[in-house]
């Protein structure tokens, strides 16, 4: 295993799979356009949901991509060597094409022939079977045929080797995970790939979607079997460069770490506290840069809240290192300038550079003011003798005043905290994290499980709304984002002022007129260049593949879109705008419902 950069890994991956008949598809935006239940794209399969359910992809049955992802459930885990909030996932896909043997052969070939990984350090795991599905002997047989001995193939239950469904129902199936033996000594607890001691590190996962779980709990065979693989770039680069479980020493993070060292006067490895703080700062500001580039700004709900939480957690860690006001901009600039790792895949970083830095700077300033308010609230609780683990956690939740800061301030003024303060605080935090993770999982019950009839109707309605807004307000209007639930649609668009009552009524009238006409919704597959020439609309700053689907509604709406949509507009029901609001920077937002 030789030295390799992130960009080199990506290039090798694409070259290998293109030679095997795969077409490259671009990374989807972080904020899902038409998923009712996901804050961010958190897996490569997420934007491909319609095609995994059977829709034909315009580029065919074999695909390869790099998908940027954000996982909110991992925020509290960041600080070790390998958990990240924003990260890149390499994936190759077979939509009703090759199956387990073919997928495993491709993975093994890339690892051993292209990356030159010694087959002797490869261990794998497969599904051991249960009442719902049989033991995955097919995958095990495929590994054996490639020279992986029986003693290096482990079988585990659904907890370890089963993917999905995302919600209560939907596509799912066994997976086969690939591990690298780091050479560390075995631990004392019967060490194997499922062990968390660090001897074995997972590097790739081959998911075989061959079942659909029904509401009654049955697992029935899928009509279209799909292969979905995922390899984390950060982890793989660390492994290939002999860095074990410390992704932060790769070229992806190290320039950011060096900047933190430079302005803090501390070294990355001088103490556990310094290492932890620098990892959190590097990860969170890198994540913030990409999230802001996708159009999100700090706030108190959903994506904006996640962004605010990341920036504020990083600022707090900066304070622990003694970093002064304004450091957030320096670290974020370091992350922005480290783009050779991303191979030019994210041009939105440069386009939005000034705005990104401005947003982060303002949020740092705002948080420092909040911390000052937290100090006042802390002193008030002390004065009232009401500083318990529960009120302390509330102080942390509302004003970002963490446990160590409460303890530091209590020691500074010689205030004795209750004996159970720490345990009570941590228990409250643990309960909150459990709720947050549950919410995060619930928020990602969409994707494969979220393509309901209601969602499909609202998706089609956004196309009509987009067309009607351009008719009423002018052709300068363009889509700036959307969000759909089973109860309503939210549509963001470029426009400098509030719509008058007359304009809102006209938009509603135009949409409802096209619904009443029961127009046919047609889909064509064509090149992106042809689609643009024929007047099909796209979402600015979104990357599209060379071949695209174009959905047309009569002679009115025409957009590049992945679908799915209703066949005829008469199925939508009565369209009604219920609310409009400003988004700032010349953007507006409207909410609308479909009534039967």
Image: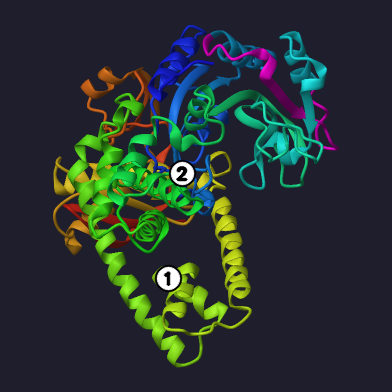
Q: Residues within 10 Å of mark 2 (few under 14, many from 20)?
A: few
Q: Mark 1 falls on what kind of element? A: loop
Across and down, in percent, residue 7 comes to 38, 22
Which residue does the numbered mark 2 point to in the structure image?
Answer: 269
- Left or right of 298? Residue 176 is right
Q: Identify the residue at image location x=33%, y=35%.
A: 255
231 lies above or below 547: below
Residue 138 seen in the current view: yes
Across and down, in percent, residue 384 comes to 46, 93
Q: Identify the residue at image location x=14%, y=44%.
A: 474
Q: Earlier in the sequence, mark 2 or mark 1?
A: 2
Q: Say which of 348 and 123 sits in front.
A: 123
Label drawn at residue 26: none
- Where does the magenta region start and end? 114-136
- Left or right of 467? Residue 571 is right
369 lies above or below 27: below
Residue 223 covered by magenta stretch: no
Q: Identify the residue at image location x=46%, y=71%.
A: 396
Which residue does the numbered mark 1 point to in the structure image?
Answer: 401
Q: Mark 2 falls on what kind of element? A: loop
- Left or right of 245? Residue 147 is right
For marks 2 and 1, give the CA distance. 26 Å
């Amino acid at each position: 295993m030789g030295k390799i950069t992130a960009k080199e890994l990506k290039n090798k991956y694409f070259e290998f799979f293109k030679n095997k008949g795969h077409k490259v598809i671009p990374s989807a935006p972080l904020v899902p356009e038409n998923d009712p239940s996901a804050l961010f794209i958190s897996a490569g399969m997420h934007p491909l949901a319609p095609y995994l359910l059977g829709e034909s992809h315009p580029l065919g049955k074999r695909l390869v991509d790099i998908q940027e992802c954000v996982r909110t459930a991992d925020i509290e885990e960041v600080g070790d060597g390998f958990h990240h909030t924003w990260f890149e996932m390499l994936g190759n896909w077979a939509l009703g094409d090759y199956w387990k043997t073919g997928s495993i052969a491709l993975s093994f070939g890339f690892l051993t022939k292209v990356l030159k990984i010694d087959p002797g350090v490869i261990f794998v795991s497969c599904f051991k079977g249960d009442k719902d599905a049989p033991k995955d002997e097919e995958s095990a047989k495929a590994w054996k045929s490639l020279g992986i001995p029986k003693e290096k193939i482990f079988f585990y239950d659904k907890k370890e080797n089963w993917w999905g469904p995302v919600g209560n129902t939907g596509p799912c199936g066994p997976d086969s995970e690939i591990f690298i033996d780091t050479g560390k000594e075995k631990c004392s607890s019967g060490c194997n790939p499922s062990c968390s001691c660090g001897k074995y590190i997972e590097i790739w996962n081959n998911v075989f979607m061959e079942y659909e779980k029904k509401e009654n709990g049955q697992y029935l065979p899928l009509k279209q079997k799909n292969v979905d693989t995922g390899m984390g770039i950060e982890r793989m680069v660390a492994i290939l460069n002999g860095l074990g479980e410390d992704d932060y020493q790769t070229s992806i993070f190290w320039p950011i770490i060096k900047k933190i060292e430079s302005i803090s006067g501390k070294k990355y490895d001088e103490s556990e506290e310094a290492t932890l703080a620098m990892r959190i700062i590097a990860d969170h500001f890198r994540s913030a840069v990409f999230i802001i580039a996708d159009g999100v700004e700090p706030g108190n709900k959903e994506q904006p809240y996640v962004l605010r939480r990341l920036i504020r957690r990083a600022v707090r860690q900066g304070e622990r290192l003694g970093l002064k006001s304004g450091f957030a901009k320096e670290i974020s600039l370091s992350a922005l300038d480290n783009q050779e790792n991303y191979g030019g895949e994210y041009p939105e970083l440069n386009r939005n550079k000034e705005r990104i830095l401005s947003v982060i700077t303002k949020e740092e300033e705002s948080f420092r003011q909040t911390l000052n308010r937290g100090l006042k609230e802390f002193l008030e609780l002390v004065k009232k003798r009401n500083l318990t683990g529960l009120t302390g956690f509330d102080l942390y939740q509302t004003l970002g005043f963490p446990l160590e800061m409460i303890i530091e301030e209590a020691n500074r003024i010689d205030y004795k905290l209750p004996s159970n303060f720490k345990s009570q605080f941590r228990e409250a935090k643990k309960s909150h994290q459990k709720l947050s993770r549950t919410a995060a999982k619930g928020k990602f019950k969409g994707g494969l499980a979220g393509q309901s009839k209601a969602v499909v109707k609202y998706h089609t309605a956004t196309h009509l709304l987009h067309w009607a807004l351009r008719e009423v307000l002018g052709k300068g209007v363009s889509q700036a984002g959307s969000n759909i639930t089973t109860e309503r649609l939210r549509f963001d668009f470029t426009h400098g002022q509030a719509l008058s009552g007359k304009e809102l009524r006209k938009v509603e009238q135009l949409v409802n007129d096209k619904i009443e006409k029961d127009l046919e919704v047609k889909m064509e597959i064509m090149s992106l260049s042809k689609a643009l020439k024929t007047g099909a609309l796209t979402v600015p700053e979104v990357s599209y593949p060379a071949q695209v689907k174009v959905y047309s509604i009569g002679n009115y709406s025409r957009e590049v879109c992945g679908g799915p949509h209703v066949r005829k507009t008469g199925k939508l029901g009565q369209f009604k705008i219920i609310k409009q609001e400003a988004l700032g920077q010349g953007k507006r937002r409207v909410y609308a419902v479909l009534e039967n």
